[in-house]
Image: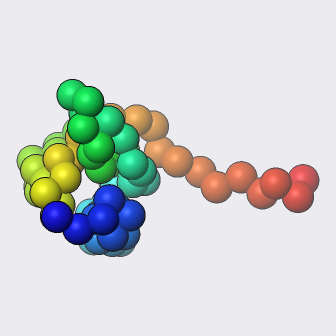
Amino acid sequence: MEDIKTAINKATKWMDEYEGVEGVAEGNKGGRQCITVFVSNEEIKNKLPKEVDGYPVKVEVTDSFNAIDDKL
């Protein structure tokens, strides 16, 4: 099994490939490390793989993410 960070890097590409994927992070599912994918469109859930490099994918529906300029 690949390192979780390698798997997350692979899943991060989904932000460019699927409209509505807002973010990707390391998470926990049933006591196991997982890849948490934040989506603003629930219909995307069925298009995403169920696992990456042996790590389960957990999808959470959220609002759209917006970047914040911390220099304000």
Determine the residue positioned at 27% across, 45% down. Answer: 34
Q: Quadrant of the N terminus?
A: bottom left
Marks counted in the figure total 0
Furthest residue to the top? 30
Quadrant of res 40: top left
Percent of width and height locating residue 48 = 15, 55
In the image shown, does 23 or 2 lie closer to the viewer? Answer: 2
Using residue 59 as the reference point, say whether residue 48 is left or right of it.
left
Up the image or down, 57 lies above or below 62; here it is: below
Determine if residue 14 is in view.
no
Determine if residue 49 is in view.
yes
Using residue 54 as the reference point, say whether residue 27 is left or right of it.
right
Percent of width and height locating residue 28 = 32, 36
Determine the residue positioned at 36% across, 41% down. Answer: 27
Quadrant of res 58: top left
Using residue 6 as the reference point, say whether residue 50 is left or right of it.
left
